[in-house]
Amino acid sequence: VVIFIEVSNSETLNTVEIQQTISERLNLPWNDAEPIAKRAKFVIKALTRKRFVILLDDSKLILTTRYREVCFQMDAQRSLIEMRILGNDASWELFLGKLSREASASVGWLGSQNDTREHAMKIAQSCGGLPLTL
């Protein structure tokens, strides 16, 4: 699913319009009475079941990658900011600090068969120590 959203260059984004555009493109029901946060959870849940790309017109994007070549291929070298990569311990601490209370408790459990912890460690390692991806 390709979702094209025209975003103005104003200081504030119109969250409701963005949500409505995504909902229309995914053929989701729309309820004006729902709060933005509840609608956001519904949209995210729907997006997790789809393969999608969202194109934001007139927006600035942040691209994170471990490979400088990717930045050059995306023509992003004009604004290239090289970030230092975190070590394993610092990466793990940052990753843990961003988890919800429930997820953190599940990962923090030190049982011998903690599959959740193993998966979390693989995810953190796959970020390559880049703070923005962690």
Image (cartoon, grey):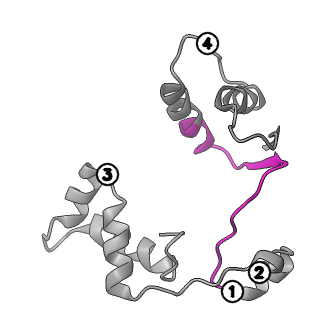
The image quarter containing residue 86 is: bottom left
Report the residue that reaches farthest toward the top: 33
* Location of residue 62 with respect to 7 vertically, above or below: below
Label 3 and label 2: CA atoms lie apart by 31 Å
Amino acid type of the residue tagged 3 in the rendering: Ser
Residue 70, which numbered label? 2
Label 4 and label 1: CA atoms lie apart by 43 Å
Q: Which residue, given by chain and number where applicable, does mark 1 sit on?
A: 67
The image quarter containing residue 68 is: bottom right
- Sooner in the amino-acid sequence: mark 4 or mark 1: 4
* Location of residue 108 with respect to 51 vertically, above or below: below
Measuring 66% from the left and 26% from the top, which residue is drawn there? 16
Depth check: give the residue in front, 62 or 102.
62
Amino acid type of the residue tagged 4 in the rendering: Asp
* Residue 122 in picture, x, y percent from top left: 41, 76
- Sooner in the amino-acid sequence: mark 1 or mark 3: 1
CA neighbours of label 3 inside 10 A, class few (<14), some (14 to 19), many (20+): few
Measuring 79% from the left and 51% from the top, which residue is drawn there? 59
Amino acid type of the residue tagged 1 in the rendering: Tyr
Q: Does dot 3 land on a helix, a strand or a loop?
A: loop
Label 2 and label 4: CA atoms lie apart by 41 Å
Q: Which residue, given by chain and number where applicable, does mark 4 sit on?
A: 32
Q: Which residues are magenta?
A: 44-66
Measuring 87% from the left and 75% from the top, which residue is drawn there? 75
Label 1 and label 3: CA atoms lie apart by 30 Å
Q: Does dot 2 land on a helix, a strand or a loop?
A: helix
Q: Quadrant of the N terminus?
A: top right
Q: Does dot 4 land on a helix, a strand or a loop?
A: loop
- Sooner in the amino-acid sequence: mark 2 or mark 4: 4
84 sits to left or right of 18? left
The number of discs equals 4
Amino acid type of the residue tagged 2 in the rendering: Val
